[in-house]
Amino acid sequence: MMSGHAEPAAETAAADAAMEVARTAARRAGVELRMLSEPAELAMVVDVVDEVWQAPPGHSLIPVEELRALAHAGNYVAAAVDESRLLGVAVGFFAAPVGTALHSHMAGVVGSARGRGVGYALKLHQRAWALERGLSEITWTFDPLVRRNAYVNLAKLGARPREYVVDFYGEIDDGLNAGQGSDRVVVAWDITTSAGVQASAEPRAETDASMPTATWSDVVPALTESESGNPEIAPGAAWSRARTVLVQTPSDIEGLRRIDPATAWSWRVAVRDILGELLAEGAAVTGFTRSGSYVVERNVS
């Protein structure tokens, strides 16, 4: 009879390999990845969170006490550190199904460190940490209008949207979301599959033509960005029965919210109406193009 030790050994090897991938990504980003638990460290996490999400003065988005409780209970509280400065943070907690999933509640990088791969390294570290604990999935939410986040989540990490939720958090009074709703896409990342390992070790192809089952002749744009930056919805007859649909995102939604909140809101409504409805009817987001569009595939009669 087999002893049964092979599977745990394989899991340990997979977790070790994943941690090495994370460390490599961290070195490329010029940071060190650390787990945090002490109040003084966690106070710096709060500062980063408030900076990234532009919290109103005196209204931190997550208190030190809550972070301390999460860390002490064995949950995930980590930071990307450059010397003594925190450039990025990530906070997650165990989720249902019990023993299989981690929910990543917050992950953010300060503006001066964006574009270095800091957030990518943090996600890979989170994956390795979860594998070490025998978990198989990480879930999180993100604003579907933020193009860079969608690209990292879907094209580089290989996570896949599970649902579109209107006003997931209700009204949020911070510098990023105030007056713009809090629609979120819930994504799930299977961290045990060979595809997940490949996505973590080597970022996926970044050309727009790289789509799982479709060719460009099959693709119909449902939502595009006009030259003036407005959302343009194609007539329903053009894409309502198409197997593969493109749903574009604005090139800079955060800048648009500052200078033209009305147009930013029109993007919220357009993406909600198109992407939200497609996911609700059972379509699947299978990729995200370099030029900023969701690739959505569905079965059609």
Image (spheres, helix red, strand yellow):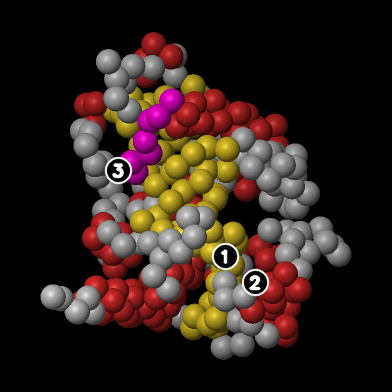
Between discs 1 and 3, the one toward the N terminus: 1
Amino acid on which disc 1 is placed:
Phe
In the image, residue 120 sits, relative to residue 45, either above or below, namely above
According to the image, label 2 marks what residue?
Answer: 70
Q: Amino acid at mark 2?
A: Leu
Residue tagged 1: 93
In what element is the residue under mark 3?
A: loop
Which quadrant of the figure has residue 65?
bottom right
- Find residue 237 and report its horizontal and vertical position in percent: 39, 11
Q: Are marks 1 and 2 in contact (CB under 8 Å)?
A: yes
Q: Would you place residue 22 above or below residue 227 in this image?
A: below
Q: Position of residue 43 (x, y in %)?
A: 73, 78
In the image, 13 versus 89, the foreground residue is 13
Question: Where does the magenta region start and end?
Answer: 281-287
Label 3 and label 2: CA atoms lie apart by: 40 Å
Q: Quadrant of the C terminus?
A: top left
Residue 73 in the image: x percent, y percent?
Answer: 62, 75
Residue 25 visible to the viewer: no
Earlier residue among tags 3 and 2: 2
